[in-house]
């Protein structure tokens, strides 16, 4: 997709871990906005994100981080807002109206809350061996999906007929939910929404891991 704002003078550097949904949502936003980027993989297993060089980029010691010509931004939702505000003056991805912004913010908050503590947490157990309450995380994931299903039964995307940052923020961990033993089969509208996002020009997939319910998936 052609960017609606002059592209940055140099590619945006994205510090990431390839299996992180937080990182994927940023990579997806960069691609949907048509922005050039340089991917730098951070070795979380070796603790690279806790070393002084990385902590100078993000004192919280977490990926993702972007460096856009010297402007360093961390936290995936903050990065999404930055990219949409800077490179999408048409405000397709983050509407300019108070109502539109509030509608998007609801789902950015969901990404930092129910998504993070539901499907994302369940996947942390199976993909990364995290010592979390898998049963509780799966239950929270189904509560979230139970909210999303009727919303998406009545509209194409989370806030209306066009995709926004709300959909970018929600996609990665919902699409990968089966890896955390969260069954998407009962949620036809959610699955149709995932397919619509995957059909957007510039869509890039997140690498899949053969764990949980995804082991026997085609």
Image: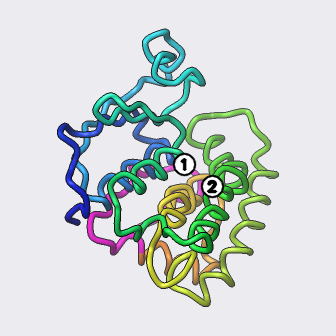
- Residue at 49% over, 69% down: 95
* Picture disc at residue 52: none
Q: How is the model colour-coded?
A: rainbow
Classify the position of the C terminus by image quarter: bottom left
The secondary structure that dominates the magenta segment is loop
Question: Which residue corresponds to the image point at 75% horizontal and 47% vertical from the top-left?
Answer: 134
Residue situated in front as seen by the camera: 18 or 82: 82
Query: Could you say where residue 60 lies in the image, as x and y percent from the top left?
Result: 60, 24
Q: Quadrant of residue 13?
A: top left
Quadrant position of residue 31: bottom left
Q: Quadrant of the N terminus?
A: bottom left
Near-viewer residue (162 or 144): 162
Q: Which residue is mark 2?
A: 111
Q: Callout 2: 10 Å neighbours few (<14), some, many (20+)? A: many
Indicate the position of residue 208 as horizontal and vertical percent values.
43, 52
Give residue 127's position: percent from left, percent from top. 56, 41
Disc 1 packing (10 Å; few <14; some 14–19; many ≥20): many
Q: Secondary structure at mark 2?
A: helix
Q: Nearer the viewer, residue 45 or 64?
A: 64
Q: Name the residue tied to disc 1.
A: 77
Task: Classify 208 as above or below 186.
Answer: above
């Amino acid at each position: 997709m052609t960017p609606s704002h002059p592209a940055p003078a140099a590619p945006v550097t994205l510090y990431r871990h390839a299996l992180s949904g937080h990182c994927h949502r940023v990579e997806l936003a960069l691609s949907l906005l048509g922005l050039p980027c340089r991917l730098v993989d951070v070795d979380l297993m070796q603790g690279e994100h806790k070393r002084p060089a990385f902590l100078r980029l993000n004192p919280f010691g977490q990926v993702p981080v972007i460096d856009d010509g010297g402007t360093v931004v961390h936290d995936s939702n903050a990065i999404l807002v930055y990219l949409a505000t800077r490179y999408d003056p048409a405000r397709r991805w983050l509407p300019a109206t108070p109502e539109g912004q509030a509608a998007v913010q609801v789902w950015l908050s969901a990404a930092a809350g129910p998504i993070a503590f539901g499907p994302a947490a369940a996947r942390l157990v199976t993909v990364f061996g995290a010592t979390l309450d898998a049963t509780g995380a799966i239950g929270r994931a189904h509560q979230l999906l139970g909210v999303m299903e009727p919303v998406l039964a009545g509209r194409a995307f989370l806030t209306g007929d066009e995709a926004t940052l709300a959909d970018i923020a929600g996609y990665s961990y919902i699409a990968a939910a089966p890896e955390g033993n969260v069954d998407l089969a009962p949620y036809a509208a959610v699955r149709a929404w995932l397919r619509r996002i995957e059909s957007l020009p510039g869509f890039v997939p997140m690498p899949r891991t053969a764990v949980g319910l995804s082991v026997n998936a085609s």
